[in-house]
Amino acid sequence: MKYGDFSSLVQLGIGLHLGTALLQMYGELGVAPLVRTIDRVRSLYLVPEGEQPPKSLKEELERLESKY
């Protein structure tokens, strides 16, 4: 057996590795805007209680967080 016998298998492994690495990076970049938006909405609840948005919005935010 020679290396040439396994070259296509090595290329397949490298291609799969690069593909999964790119998909993981794309997922992280795609979720980043959602995380920033959720953090901004959550910061609305750091103000004193009289100035906070309704509790129903907080419950909806928690549902969205658990979903994603």
Image (cartoon, helix red, strand yellow):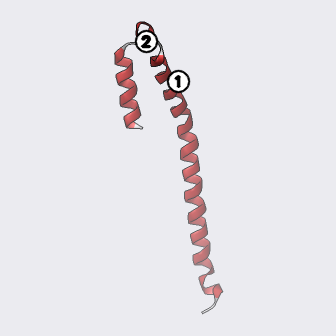
Q: Residue at x 38, y 19 (%)?
A: 57
Q: Where does the image place residue 49, in percent across and percent down from the top left?
A: 40, 10
Residue at 58% in and 49% down: 25
Name the residue type under label 2. Answer: Gln
Q: Which mark is residue 29?
A: none
**Cα distance, mark 1 to mark 2?**
13 Å
Q: Earlier in the sequence, mark 1 or mark 2?
A: 1
Where does residue 16 sit, x and y in percent of width and height? Answer: 56, 65
Identify which residue is drawn at 37% across, 13% down: 54
Q: Which residue position holds label 1? A: 40
Residue lying farthest bottom? 1
Say above or below: 40 vs 67.
above
Question: How many numbered badges does the structure rendering display?
Answer: 2
Circle 1 Cα neighbour tier, 10 Å, few/some/many (<14 / 14–19 / ≥20) = few
* Mark 1 residue element: helix
What's the mark number on residue 52?
2
Is label 2 in a helix, a strand or a loop?
Answer: loop
Residue that sits furthest to the top in the current view: 50
